[in-house]
Image (cartoon, rainbow, N blue to C red):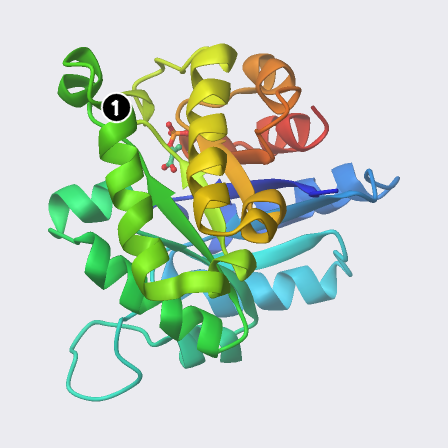
């Protein structure tokens, strides 16, 4: 049985005071217990990881794990501005988002780089959350499955059966930050497609890998999305900045 996982991606938002308020509110909301078969993760910007790790500890927030929004493909050296997977691990991260469409678009990250980053993250005992997804043009021209399968193929080629220790996030680019959510059936169809593609490689990997949906997830659409058989949770961007909405999605 795959656990349901909800990951909040704060993107480049937050400050010391608002981060502390967020963790306090979520701690209060989780005080009375949360479903045991679920996992919850928050991914603040790198400069706030240490603060959030400390706050999670102070509030004894056993239900909430820390994640990062990116990691370097290198282990150390002359890579100004980058953070290595071992540094993120040292700060208490358990998950790392990789290949987010904003990084692919704005930083020209390609699948091979995403796979190299995933290896670094795995080698440091954390879980890569590998994002894939098609643009509006690719979907409108009937190429959505081909594009996503191409992205998955490149990960399989490098990661092989280590994919079993990764999460995949299907994030249609046209749904990210736009308010246009994929219908639960459209998302389920793509998740199914990804799982069948993985099964061609290895049945065990396919049945164990968690596939999350991301793209304008909100408290009012999370229930329907999470009820789909191949949707194992959500990667939530903008809405996760509001701790009450994040809690509502966690409880969906
Ligand atoms: C994201 O950034 O991963 C994301 C899904 O964003 P949003 O929820 O704002 O669409």
Q: Nearer the viewer, residue 94 or 45?
A: 94
Locate residue 181: give its quadrant: top left
Residue 176: image location, x then y, percent: 32, 27
Q: Dot 1, crowdedness within 10 Å: few (<14), some or many (≥20)?
A: some
Task: Give the SS element for disc 1.
Answer: helix
Give the quadrant of ligand 1. Answer: top left
Q: Is residue 130 visible?
A: yes
- Farthest-out residue, right: 32
Residue beneath the point at 30% across and 48% down? 153
Residue 184: image location, x then y, percent: 51, 14
Q: Nearer the viewer, residue 78 or 245?
A: 78
Residue beneath the point at 29% across and 26% down? 145
Residue beneath the point at 50% across and 46% down? 18
Q: Is residue 9 visible?
A: no
Tell me the quarter of the image containing the C terminus: top right
Residue 17: image location, x then y, percent: 50, 51
- Farthest-out residue, bottom: 77
Q: Is residue 56 left or right of residue 175?
A: right
Q: Is residue 250 left or right of residue 43?
A: right
Q: Is residue 149 left or right of residue 21?
A: left
Residue beneath the point at 16% across and 22% down? 138
Residue tagged by mark 1? 144
Locate residue 121: give its quadrant: bottom left
Tell me the quarter of the image containing the N terminus: top right
């Amino acid at each position: 049985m795959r656990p349901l996982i909800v990951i909040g991606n704060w993107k480049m938002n937050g400050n010391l005071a608002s981060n502390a308020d967020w963790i306090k509110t979520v701690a209060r909301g989780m005080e009375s217990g949360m479903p045991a078969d679920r996992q919850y993760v928050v991914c603040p910007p790198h400069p706030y990881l240490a603060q959030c790790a400390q706050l999670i500890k102070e509030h004894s927030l056993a239900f909430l794990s820390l994640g990062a929004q990116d990691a370097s493909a290198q282990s150390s050296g002359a890579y100004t501005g980058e953070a290595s997977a071992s540094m993120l691990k040292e700060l208490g991260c358990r998950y790392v988002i990789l290949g987010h469409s904003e990084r692919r678009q704005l930083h020209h990250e390609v699948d091979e780089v995403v796979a190299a980053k995933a290896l670094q993250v795995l080698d440091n005992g954390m879980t890569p959350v590998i994002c894939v997804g098609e643009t509006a043009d690719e979907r409108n021209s009937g190429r959505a499955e081909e594009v996503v399968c191409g992205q998955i193929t490149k990960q399989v080629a490098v990661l092989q059966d280590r994919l079993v220790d990764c999460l995949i996030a299907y994030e249609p680019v046209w749904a990210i930050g736009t308010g246009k959510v994929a219908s639960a059936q459209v998302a389920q169809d793509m998740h199914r497609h990804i799982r069948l593609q993985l099964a061609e490689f290895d049945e065990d990997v396919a049945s164990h890998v968690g596939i999350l949906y991301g793209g304008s997830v909100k408290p009012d659409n999370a229930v329907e999305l999470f009820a789909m058989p191949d949707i194992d949770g959500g990667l939530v961007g903008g809405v996760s900045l509001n701790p009450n909405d994040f809690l509502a999605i966690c409880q969906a």
